[in-house]
Amino acid sequence: MPAAIFLDRDGTLIEEVHYLSRLEDLRFLPGVPEALRSLQAAGFTLVLLTNQSGVARGLLTEETLQKLHAALTDRLASAGVHLDALYYCPHHPDYGPPRYRKSCTCRKPATGMMEAATARLQLDLSASWAVGDKWSDLEGPLKMGCRAILVRTGHGREQEVLRVEAPVGVQVVEDFPEAARKILAETNLS
Ligand SMILES: [Mg+2]
Ligand SMILES: [Zn+2]
């Protein structure tokens, strides 16, 4: 069974922009496409999981979000990276019209998106990792037996100081390329 990297989007792979909605604001953080390519070459399945409550809040439509994701996927493809799956949660418990305003099972830290990916791609969670800039990106995967890395890009630095020490199984690194190197180093050892 393949192992996955559960990837957060904003502040982890791309620049944190407050409720990104414009294509011209979509920018990869330094070294990200290359780091994804190295993980893919090592045999990892790449799964992007992103909370997009901007949809519920009326700041962008799902159509716009899908255009952004098509652009993101295209840019990765031209760097030789194939995303195996991309899931987003458009909901928020307190905002928006009824179809978006709900306590859903997909909004991280809930595990609905990763469970859907795990079932569809038959993933080995014990060999999988999560990388994100918020603890809420990592809690679900940790609970389900993955290892996890918090990056200091995006909201990472603010998040890091919210906890006296990282939970068991979590490493904190500067950025996504460093996270990828850690994962590859530990993969080669096992
Ligand atoms: Mg993020
Ligand atoms: Zn949701």
Image (cartoon, helix red, strand yellow):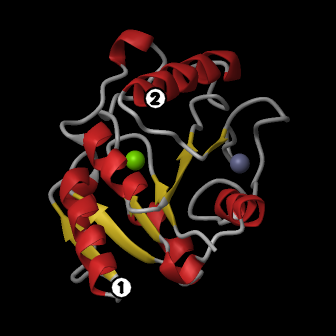
- Per the image, the residue denoted by label 2 is 77
Residue placed most toward the observer, 43 or 154:
43
Residue 76 vertical placement versus 26 (above, below): below
User: Of the residues under marks 1 and 2, which one precedes in the sequence?
Assistant: 2
Quadrant into which the N terminus falls? bottom right
Does the image show residue 161?
Answer: no
The residue positioned 28% from the left and 48% from the top of the image is 35
Does the image show residue 124?
Answer: yes
Q: What is the three-letter code of the residue carrying label 2? A: Ala
Residue placed most toward the observer, 93 or 10:
10
Residue placed most toward the observer, 148 or 75:
75
Q: Estimate the x, y position of residue 29 in percent, counting from the top left.
A: 24, 36
Check disc 1 and report its element: helix, strand or loop.
loop
Q: CA distance from mark 1 to mark 2?
A: 31 Å
- Per the image, the residue denoted by label 1 is 169
Quadrant into which the C terminus falls? bottom left
Q: Estimate the x, y position of residue 22 in percent, counting from the top left.
A: 44, 12
Q: Are marks 1 and 2 in contact (CB under 8 Å)?
A: no
Depth check, mark 1 against mark 2: the one in front is 2
Residue 33 vertical placement versus 157 (above, below): above
The residue positioned 49% from the left and 79% from the top of the image is 127
**Ligand 1 neighbours mark 2 (CB distance < 8 Å):** no
Q: What is the three-letter code of the residue carrying label 1? A: Gly
The residue positioned 70% from the left and 60% from the top of the image is 121
Q: Estimate the x, y position of residue 75 in percent, counting from the top left.
A: 41, 23
Check disc 2 and report its element: helix, strand or loop.
helix
Tell me if 135 is positioned left or right of 87 in this view: left
The residue positioned 45% from the left and 53% from the top of the image is 7
